Image (cartoon, rainbow, N blue to C red):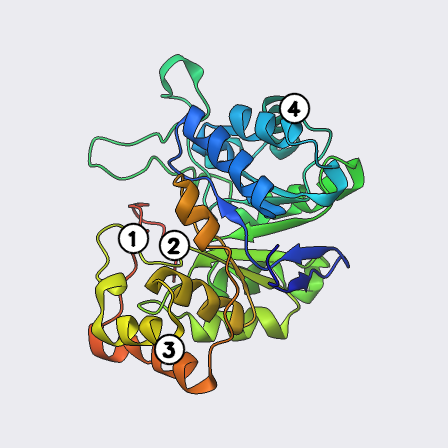
Amino acid sequence: MSTFPTLTLNTGAKLPAVGLGTWQSPDQEAYNAVATALKLGYRHIDGAAIYRNEVPVGKAIRDSGIPRSEIFVTTKLWGTQHREPEKALDASLQRLGLDYVDLYLVHWPVALKTNNLKDGDLLTIPVKDDGNRDVDLEGWDYVKTWELVQKLVETGKTKAVGVSNFSINNLKAILKPELKFVVPAANQIEVHPQLPQDELIEFCNAHGIVVEAYCPLGSTTSTLLSDPDLLKIASKYSVEPAQVLINWGVARGYSVLPKSVNPKRIESNFKAIKLSPEDIQAISDLHKKVGTHRYVDPKWGSFEAFA
């Protein structure tokens, strides 16, 4: 069993600091990965409607034999359903086979149009001829989405609500005092040494918003895991570079969501390591050498998601 800490949401709920990400996991691999993770002691599973694998993820959770109250489950509202978030949550719960989720996130701060969807499939990415996503900015914005999403806790279908990929300016827009909106419980964002997000993390911490880090290892095209300085630190602790990066994130005080379908990696990712302050700082400074890079940066046309 891991000795990773838990974080406390502004609802009082406890969030395990390390969870299993399920993005890009095909059905059987998603089922096996979640089942393996739960057997190894993971109690935090992160999913999303657009991942299109909620059915196997939910089945693995139910088949685990672990009491539902002991597993923290997250799913997310896709852009095609911003105008009807409760209906979207109902659909996610049906696919998951669960009565509730612990956290429901607005996946991106932008709605997508649905008038040109093939076969009316809402779990898709509508794209215009120019390659940009077909954004819905006509009389709608993420502030209106949050106004609806914040009310979902009252239904009992989710224990908490939050956001994902929200910038400081996006957060400021829904935190205006005059709106009297619920403060998001979490903001799930891309974080790794090439994108440390110091300012955004500081803002979230100041407002009681727990940060969750996706892509904590960079990406499959990242050179982070082969960086000589990181390899030297990993060798010092007799661990893999990925384990160092996961523990670096935990040491910085946020939740980390490594994704894997490999049983051995799922196990190794769950090993807690006590990094020295000097090593934590060295990893934090890596971007000064290798440069900054955002790996998840969809084309939203005129909408600047990270502005």
Provide the secondary structure element on which disc 3 rests. helix
Q: In the image, residue 21 lies at what x, y percent?
A: 47, 45
| Residue 240, above or below 296 | below
Distance in Å between CA atoms under marks 2 and 4: 27 Å
Q: Where's residue 100, x and y in %?
A: 71, 34
Amino acid at circle 4: Gly
Can you tell which quarter of the image residue 115 is in? Answer: top left
Residue marked by disc 3: 284
* Mark 2 neighbour density, 10 Å: few (under 14) some (14–19) many (20 or more): many
Is 289 or 227 nearer to us in this picture?
Answer: 227
Residue matched to label 2: 215
Give the camera-side residue of 73 and 91: 73
Disc 1 target residue = 219
Could you tell me how far apart the alpha carbons at marks 1 and 4 are, in whole angstroms?
A: 31 Å
The residue identified by callout 4 is 97
- The residue lying toward the viewer, choosing from 7 and 92, is 7
